[in-house]
Amino acid sequence: MHYPSDLTGTHKPQEREARVELGVDLESLAAWMSGQGLGSGAIVDAVRLTGGTQNILLRFSRDGRDYVLRRPPSHPRPNSNETMRREARVLTALAGTAVPHPGLIAACSDESVLGAAFYLMEPIAGFNPVSGLPALHAGSAAIQHRMGLALVEALAALGALDHVALGLADFGKPDRYLERQVARWQSQLDGYAEFAGWPGQAALGDVAAIGYWLDAHRPASFTPGVMHGDFHMANVMFREDGPELAAVVDWELATIGDPLIDLGWLLATWPEPGDEGAVSVKPWIGFPTAAELVAHYAARSSRDAGAIGWYAVFGCYKLGILLEGTHARACAGKAPRDVGDRLHARSLWLFERAARWVRHGLPAAAQQGTPA
């Protein structure tokens, strides 16, 4: 797809409609790329990979090279542009490390070019397991088992990075990072009361008790490092030809904090026997147990995973509060009700799981083969 230059500043109706659909002004993008030495001529084969309220991903070709553009949604949140700049910065820092990630080509912090900050990255050859497993992966327990281990190897590699040496010393606020977490997320939950029709915190069970437990059992110290901030199956891509990771994606919540939170976040969504919907990957025939994930991480990291139960409970707590926000907005008519109800059910599931882990601890092992 190509939009020819129009010196009059007007465009044919079909060109304007296509531009709106793509969410990107390809003429302005091409002009900027030329200034960056990124090829010449028309942008062709442009296709929107995602959209709606999510960040815009646009794949296209120019001068024989393929690109993926990432920018905030057409109706961005107040911090969307700064988030995009931070994401580009962390991808720049990850270049040459052992952490699988999208290769950054160029970034533009000038919002006047496309109406928002954006960056260009290399296309990733791979698949997201939540979108479906290829036959090779769906039919092999051994491949699935290795996929799970590859996940925690990426986390161990990320946690081993020296963020200061990578130029990320000011990328976050690690001082008292763990001490701030419960109050920060309880405050967010309290804020949902502004949405008319939301039944309130009481409908979620004893969330406050989980917060009290987290504050009372918080690890005494940690070594700061780079965190992904949203590490789970939906934010990774695997190679088509085997079980290895192609890339960890969606770095918009990356910061400097306690990297063990990423492992706890993964465990919060990992299935146990009898769990329904812990992760959206089917078939689930060979993935490691939660205990195997922790052991594999501990064998490859200098970080002390002895308090991993705390991090897993915190993962449930934070994610449950985040998902409940959509339910609160749906109650007030500011989000689709069916989506809000579905995420409310997931929040309840997470808080119940957290409460169970508070009472009994993480399971020593979980049998494989539980469908998710």
Image (cartoon, rainbow, N blue to C red):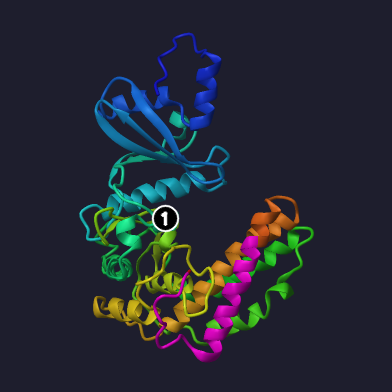
Left or right: 132 as drawn, with respect to 142: right
The front one of 203 and 274 is 274
Where residue 211 sits, quadrant-wise, is: bottom right
Q: Is residue 167 above or below residue 214?
A: above
Where residue 49 sits, quadrant-wise, is: top left
Q: Is residue 365 above or below residue 43?
A: below
Residue 346, x across and y down, in percent: 60, 67
Residue 347, x across and y down, in percent: 61, 69
Q: Identify the residue shown where x is 51% and y is 79%.
A: 313
Residue 249, x across and y down, in percent: 37, 54
Left or right: 304 as drawn, with respect to 192: left
Name the residue furthest right: 197
Q: Residues within 10 Å of mark 1 (few under 14, many from 20)?
A: some
Q: Quadrant of the N terminus?
A: top left
- Residue type at mark 1 is Gly
Q: Identify the residue shown where x is 75% and y is 54%.
A: 332
Name the residue furthest top: 8
Q: Identify the residue shown where x is 26% and y is 69%.
A: 160
Residue 319, x across and y down, in percent: 54, 67
Q: Which residue is mark 1?
A: 132
Q: Is residue 331 above or below residue 80?
A: below
Q: Secondary structure at mark 1?
A: loop
The front one of 236 and 34 is 236
Q: Identify the residue shown where x is 59% and y is 81%.
A: 210
Where residue 109 sits, quadrant-wise, is: top left
The front one of 105 and 241 is 241
* Residue 354 lies in the magenta stretch: yes
Q: Is residue 78 visible?
A: yes
The boundaries of the magenta stretch are 342-371
**How many labels, in total?**
1
